[in-house]
Amino acid sequence: MNELSRIDTLKGVGEKTASLFLKIKVSTIGELLDYYPRTYDVYEDSILISEIEEGKIVTVTGAIFGRIQVSGNKNMQITSLLLKDISGTLKVIWYRMPFLRTTLSRGGMLTLRGKVTHKKNGIVMEQPEIFYPAHTYEEKKGTLQPVYSLTTGLTNNLIKKAMIQAMEIIDEDGEFLPEELRKKYQLETYEQSRRNIHFPKTKASFINARHRLVFEEFLMFVLSLRMQKEKEEKYQNQFVFHPQPLVDTFIKNLPFELTSAQKKVWNEIKKDMSSEHMMSRLVQGDVGSGKTMVAFLAMLYASLNGYQSALMAPTEVLARQHYETITKLLIEYHLPLKIQLLTGSMTAKEKRESYSKIETGSVDLIVGTHALIQEKVHYKNLALVITDEQHRFGVQQRELLAGKGSMPHILVMSATPIPRTLGIILYGDLDISIIDELPQNRLPIKNCVVDTGYRNTAYKFMAAQISQGRQCYVICPMVEESEHLEVENVTDYTELLREHFPSSIKVACLHGKMKQVEKEKLMDAFGKNEIQILVSTTVIEVGIDVPNATVMLIENAERFGLAQLHQLRGRVGRGKHQSYCIFMSAAKSKETKERLEILNKSNDGFFIASEDLRLRGPGDLFGIRQSGLMNFKLGDVFQDAQILKDASDAAQEIQQEDTRLTTEKYKKLAKYIEKNISEYFLEKTL
Ligand code: ADP
Ligand code: MG
């Protein structure tokens, strides 16, 4: 057996379990090793029975007091005992384990670890893990036990058991980083890191393992970007662009003047599109800075030159919104161009019709989701692809399109505020344009950071805004444990608001588990002010544009990263009315307040991102939700910014030594990149 062996070669993994593993995309032992824990359970010291708080998982040590009893019927036998320590006694029960009566009956001390809940007759520890005799707990004490993301039927124990076996199979010469590099950046070995990420003996060994794996992940990413950049520099521009007076007329007729930042970026794009090489450009600008307008100019320019252009959004809601905005512009400004929408949720017939219009060239502008780059789509003459918040669009997608006859110019738009130092690394394959100026007519958002005692005042404020015709967003407290709970949470909160507000105020809820069509219907209704309060999880984080919404209330703001909070806030302040953002925090700590105060003081995404980085520090591993930026498996570009910088330095050193990674020293590394490259460039969709 080796890392390439199929998962069902492990003991206890049959056909059925293997199919469950397949659901979490694990089919080989190597893939299993790459399935990192979501978090860890810590085996803490025993506490006194009198110190127990219900609802918690605790460890207690004591002696069995009195007899062990077995009750219930054949199908559900309940074994119960009383555990006694110097502070009191605790009732303990197990289901379907009658044999415990014999194994535990000899008395003596034992240690139990389990969840304590409140039952009819007081608190009970249910189904605890048993350490008998008590000193056997010593071995586990202080260790971290892996907790994996699960799927129905696949338990943590099943994964753990398989993982323990996989530990025996780790490839000893799987190491692909030269020793010199490992020494320089203090990285442990391939084998150690794989072992310790799953079963760390101490917190320190977890941190070391994670450090190596994050470094590895970033290094692969940066190296592939650099290699890509080199390759792209060779792509010749096969399109011919002529000046288009209609674009200038359009700009002149807009009800506002472009900001000078917009003008500057628009000129950069125009120049790129008619240069010798293909454009690969990122337009970075804070929410509401007018990126979409610039993108539209580029599409207009391409299409008036007789080519097709496409705009790809990360979600259907956003795609539809872009489609509607652009359609309105085309009509209002009498532009002689045809637009087509293409999304995954369209019916087969609708799709077929779109494909045919795209292929024959009867449409000029195409707006959609990832459906735009799927196999069945053939473009007549696609010259420009613009993506919105898809940071990893690039390489593979461009080549995919090239394979179908067109190698388009690429423009990536992003409102994700990343400190510039990191941006240069993360967007290594792109030229960067920055829109660092907001349109003049914007009133800055008014912010406040408050505690939960302010909630009713906040509701009153919302009601007042609604009575003036405005609308509100409420971002719901976040629940980490499960998607199911998250849904429950938003729906409950929505009910609460419905009861609180008069029935004339319509409250609706939006969450990630809803069907696409439902989400669209809702957003549509919210856009038309048929709904006044939209309660949501963070699914509305990117892009949504309802200028009439003026209040953003964020519950449990302390649980979000600052950058994410800033993104959320960007959903308001998009129109002519004064907007407000209320960060409600349940945490009392000074650090949390200080962190949130940064949002209070600044509306500058870049500044906020770098402050976030400064305050979080590397110790904060599980506390705050990851930024989720760019979908790294373990790494977080904010939290692990230092590792990212190190990996970037290492990439540069490696390439200075051996540009194409062909020498013996880097052969394995090259192979590893090749094997994993797709992970870095295919962005998951919502
Ligand atoms: P972004 O994509 O950067 O979030 P948008 O392009 O969607 O921003 O612009 C937000 C709103 O501001 C849109 O309604 C747009 O028409 C408007 N807008 C764009 N540029 C300007 C400008 N220079 N002056 C005033 N309003 C603008
Ligand atoms: Mg936008």
Image (cartoon, rainbow, N blue to C red):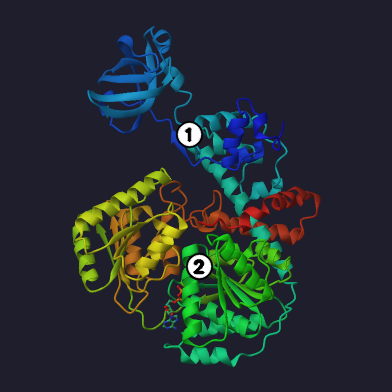
Q: Secondary structure at mark 1?
A: strand
In this rendering, the answer to whether 309 lies above or below 58 is: below
Q: Which mark is residue 319?
A: 2
Label 1: few (<14), some or many (≥20) within 10 Å? many
Please indicate whether residue 502 sits to the left or right of residue 164 in the image.
left
Residue 71 visible in the current orientation: yes
Quadrant of the displayed image that contains ligand 1: bottom left
In this rendering, the answer to whether 2 lies above or below 240 is: above
Residue 279 visible in the current orientation: no
Residue 79 lies in quadrant = top left
Which amino acid, by three-letter code, is at mark 2? Ala
Q: Pinpoint residue 582: horizontal percent, then vertical percent.
A: 28, 63
Residue 351 lies in quadrant = bottom right
Label 2: few (<14), some or many (≥20) within 10 Å? many
Please indicate whether residue 332 sits to the left or right of residue 247 in the image.
left
Q: Pinpoint residue 58: horizontal percent, then vertical percent.
A: 35, 29
Q: Pinpoint residue 434: horizontal percent, then vertical percent.
A: 52, 75
Residue 171 lies in quadrant = top right
Which amino acid, by three-letter code, is at mark 1? Leu
Q: Pinpoint residue 667: horizontal percent, then vertical percent.
A: 77, 50
Judging depth in this view, the residue of 172 and 322 nearest the camera is 322
Q: Residue at 68% across / 35% down in the picture?
A: 6
Q: Earlier in the sequence, mark 1 or mark 2?
A: 1
Q: Which residue is mark 1?
A: 144
